[in-house]
């Protein structure tokens, strides 16, 4: 609204001309005197002819709305567009999320601050996922090699930030008609064809009663899972309750306490680049040195700067330092990131086992031959081990 203004019109039948930009392009072909441009806001209020001052009895009905309530209301509007301040759930002051700190007294204070934040993030993620429901979907039916029913359909993302990836769970629904009852089934995405209008292949867990003779209209729902957020909450509980969960150094480092820096006395490799990977540059070599000599390190860099290659080189040297005794656990925030790390570490010649969720075992990937379930199925051993 601060970019809006008006120019008094010459005709008596017209009052004003509103423009978003005060430029010659906005009034091309019109003979307006731009020296008469006037703003719509003065003294932090709209001009009275544009927005009339409410009478006293209406002002008495006005309520004070905080910024936090406004933010909550905007979230509620995504699922309930006609909601008002009275629809907001009132929360006690001690339930509100507290700002994070640079240092914490102990793990209990850390947990008390981050647990509400994790819950807020989980609630937001749930609302965003469940708001992506799409109706009037056309389905093309197929059967996979494992004899399971596959539904193909085009899925247009409502939210550009929400990325659909193989392994995601979706619910396929049919409302029913005069000849068929209502039906629904959950499945997981096994393939995405971005070239063909975001076409998705959904493998159903159960196809019993599926209206395979019908292609329209179906509905698609995201199946939200709290697994990641439950693990975050559980980790903070362990962090606060179990002293043996980690070393004293890591404990105080996470809490932001001043602790003496530790350095491991380990022989540095003569060559920091790992076999099968691109040569490391100077900053990447310094990152590898830091990780090998410290108990806790953070490597930062924008996309394309070689963080994955550097991480794979770190794993290679950690294994060589231990001379094959013990294993190195490598984690990442997404399945795609884990696959990329697996591929890079495998290229160094190390033995790699990729662990994935049960729902992703049917999802093809470039490192499928390194997954645990793939290797176990091909073991030439007893039936019991194959079941494991």
Image (spheres, grey):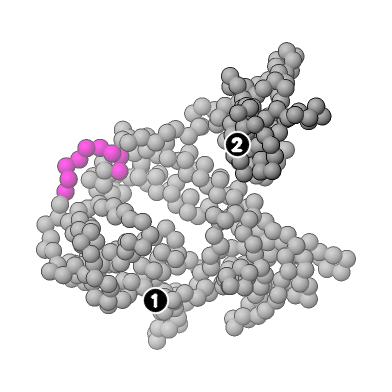
> Where the N terminus falls, by quadrant?
top right
Q: Secondary structure at mark 1?
A: helix
The front one of 52 and 35 is 35
98 vs 205: above or below: above
- Do the residues bearing badges 1 and 2 touch, measured as CB atoms within 8 Å? no
| Residue 23 magenta | no
Q: Secondary structure at mark 2?
A: loop
Q: Nearer the viewer, mark 1 or mark 2?
A: 2
Task: Tell me the quarter of the picture where residue 283 sits.
Answer: bottom left
Left or right: 333 in relation to 270? right
The front one of 169 and 291 is 291
- Dominant secondary structure, magenta: loop
What residue sits right under mark 2 in the picture? Answer: 22
Q: Measuring from the top left, give residue 378's x and y in whole percent.
A: 43, 84
Residue that protrudes farthest toward the bottom in the picture: 380
What residue sits right under mark 1 in the picture? Answer: 370
Report the residue at 62% width, 32% height from top: 34
Residue that protrudes farthest toward the top in the picture: 56
The front one of 386 and 193 is 193
Left or right: 226 in relation to 261? right
Q: Residue 177: in sight, yes or no?
A: yes
Report the residue at 57% width, 27% height from top: 66
200 vs 292: above or below: below
């Amino acid at each position: 609204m601060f970019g809006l203004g008006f120019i008094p019109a010459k005709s008596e039948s017209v009052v004003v001309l509103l423009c978003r930009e005060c430029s010659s392009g906005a009034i091309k072909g019109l003979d307006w005197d731009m020296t008469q441009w006037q703003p719509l806001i003065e003294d932090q209020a709209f001009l009275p002819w544009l927005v009339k001052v409410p009478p006293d009895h209406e002002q008495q009905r006005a309520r004070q709305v905080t910024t936090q309530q406004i933010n909550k209301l905007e979230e509620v509007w995504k699922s309930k567009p006609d909601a008002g301040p009275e629809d907001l759930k009132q929360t006690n002051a001690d339930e509100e999320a507290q700002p994070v700190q640079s240092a914490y007294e102990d793990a209990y204070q850390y947990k008390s601050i981050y647990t509400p934040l994790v819950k807020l993030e989980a609630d937001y993620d749930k609302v965003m996922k469940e708001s992506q429901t799409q109706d009037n979907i056309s389905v093309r039916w197929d059967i996979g090699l494992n004899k399971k029913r596959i539904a193909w359909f085009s899925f247009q993302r409502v939210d550009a930030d929400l990325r659909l990836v193989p392994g995601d769970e979706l619910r396929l629904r049919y409302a029913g008609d005069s000849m068929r009852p209502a039906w629904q089934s959950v499945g997981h995405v096994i393939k995405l064809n971005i070239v063909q209008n975001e076409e998705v292949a959904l493998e159903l867990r159960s196809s019993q009663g599926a209206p395979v003779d019908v292609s329209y209209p179906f509905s698609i729902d995201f199946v939200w899972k709290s697994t990641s957020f439950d693990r975050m909450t559980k980790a903070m509980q362990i962090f606060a309750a179990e002293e043996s969960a980690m070393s004293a150094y890591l404990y105080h480092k996470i809490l932001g306490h001043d602790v003496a820096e530790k350095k491991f006395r380990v022989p540095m490799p003569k060559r920091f680049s790992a076999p099968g990977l691109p040569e490391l540059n100077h900053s990447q070599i310094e990152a590898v040195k830091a990780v090998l000599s410290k108990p806790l390190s953070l490597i930062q860099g924008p996309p394309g700067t070689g963080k994955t290659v550097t991480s794979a080189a770190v794993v290679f040297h950690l294994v060589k330092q231990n001379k094959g005794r013990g294993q190195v656990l490598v984690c990442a925030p997404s399945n795609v990131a884990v696959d990329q790390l697996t591929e890079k570490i495998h290229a160094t010649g190390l033995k790699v086992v990729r662990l994935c969720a049960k729902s992703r075992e049917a999802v093809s990937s470039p490192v499928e031959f390194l997954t645990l379930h793939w290797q176990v199925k091909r073991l030439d051993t007893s039936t019991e081990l194959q079941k494991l």
